[in-house]
Amino acid sequence: MKKLLLGAAALSVLAALPAYAADPVDAQRMAQDIKILSSDAFEGRGPATEGEKKTVAYIAEQMKAAGLQPGGDLKGRARAWTQDVPLARFTTKGPVNVSVKAGGETQAWAQGEQIAIRAAQTGIDRLTVKDAPVVFVGYGVTAPEKKWDDFKGYDLKGKVALVLVNDPDFETGEGDFGGKAMTYYGRWTYKYEEAARQGAVGFLVIHEREPASYGWATVKNSNTNEIFDVIRKNPSEAHAPLEGWVQRDNAVDLFRKAGLDFEALKKQAQTRDFRPVELRGVTFSTDYAVDAQKVVSKNVVGVLPGKTRPDERVFYTAHWDHLGVGLPDAKGDRIYNGAVDNASGTAALIELGRAFAKGPRPDRSIVFLAVTAEEKGLLGTEYYADNPLYPLGTTVADLNMDGMNLIGPARDVTMSGNAPLTLQDDLIKLAAERGLSFSPDPNPQAGSFYRSDHFPFAKRGVPAISFGAGETLAKGGAEAGKAASEAYIKDKYHQPADEYDPNWDLTGLSQEVGLFYEMGRRLANSNVWPEWKEGAEFKAERDKTRSMRR
């Protein structure tokens, strides 16, 4: 007989078991894993490279040594350590030529400097755009449920659109799009999807530091490298030919030469009355070759079978990939080592596997999933969620790790975005047991909920969260934590400088991974199913599989 599913008010996962006196995780061992995975020998861990082969082999070896079982694709009757993830890879060949005509003058724009164009993902071998008219489309949003349409029937065929990043609410903090907290309409991924739906030649996102939440270096390094996508039957339904970013100052100059006021038009774009505005006398041209290939990357999967309910599974996830080898920085370094992002999360995933394998066998199974191509759009997790090795309906929860705390112990914990889940309540209670407070996402405008590997699980209904240490440090408080976070984003995030540092304070790492351990332990030994709260956008999807959960 099926048990009645109870909400958080009736029964909490955390009430089921007492806390461990000490967490069985070893920070020094994790630091060694980070050092290895982020070394130059692993070449920045780019998908479908020699660096991937080394990375996948290392993770699988460590999982095997820990005592986990392979949980990937079925090979006959046995499972492999990996899940194949077929992807399309797109790279530019030769120079990327870009020019704009404005005010009677022609300007050449340099790839990576004034503009960052992504390799075309529509299956063409060359993209040529000649003197395409340029149109400003505000935030590029079509949201019928909010009675919002930035296009008003404007025909974008044959045109290049300039679009603002983030939501119409970002500047004022008020409105129908969540205020400062980014919705999916604010993500650049949505903007590109809308470009395809509108039939435009393409969208160029105007980069502004605050609404984007990162600097131009991050944009350049993420978009001028190899571009990956899932393999699609009709790529042009998901992508316009041209996708890219343009520096704010260059965009403002185009507006000025067209006799337009950028700031005034941005204010108009924050209202429902906005209509697209053509930049008179401004045209855009580009020409470059594209190399498109089908490749197979790998997710790595280790499993610890449950003792009494092995068909119910708690997931830990972390992405193993980074940006590989790309454009050089000012020092000439071309290897994007990705020590914090996300060798640290991968090391934590491996260490959690060791801790659980050596401890008492949990009632539910635990799956340790190291995913590929997160930096290319959460593609490894998207593929898993579309092709699950284990039913999503009996997946208890996903606890995702991305960029661990290496700057010292914190006094609080936080989330990536807001998760209207009983899991969040459980996290808050667990943190309180350990003398930690809970702080909401300090940068909701960054849209972090949509940018981490828990999201492909979440949008299919699986209770899923990314959490970790907050910014209030034990040494220096909130001011020190915010300064460290801002310095990392400015100087290291998606840059070659994200390297292993022997001077890291590992006590924060132990604290954070210990929290993940205890959260997963309690979930794995409970008979409670975490739930989305009433009104949560993914609750209906989870409810479709209610009959699968006893």
Image (cartoon, rainbow, N blue to C red):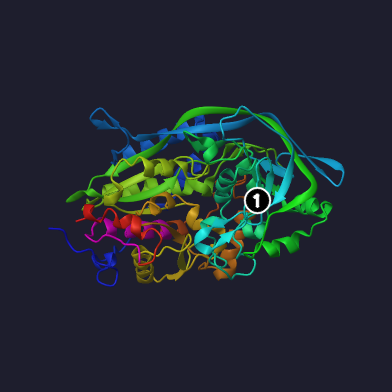
Q: Which residue does the numbered mark 1 point to in the structure image?
A: 154
Q: Which residues are magenta?
A: 511-533
Residue 307 is situated, as x and y percent measured from the top left of the image, at: 18, 49
Quarter of the figure with the N terminus:
bottom left
- Residue at the image point whose x is 49% and y is 31% from the top: 48
Q: Viewer-proximal residue, 70 or 297?
A: 297
Rendered residue at 44%/41% (across/down): 380
Q: Amino acid at mark 1?
A: Tyr
Q: Is residue 305 left or right of residue 149?
A: left
Q: Is residue 235 above or below residue 381?
A: above
Which residue ends up furthest to the right in the rendered image?
104
Horizontal and vertical percent for residue 94?
Answer: 69, 27
Q: Is residue 24 left or right of residue 122?
A: left
How crowded is the residue under tag 1: few (<14 C-alpha within 10 Å), some, or many (20+)?
few
Q: Determine the residue located farthest toward the left in the rendered image.
A: 1
Between residue 323 and residue 137, name the one nearer to us.
137
Residue 419, relative to residue 198: is it above or below? below
Residue at 60% over, 55% down? 488
* Helix, strand or loop under label 1: loop
Q: Position of residue 185 (x, y in %)?
A: 54, 56
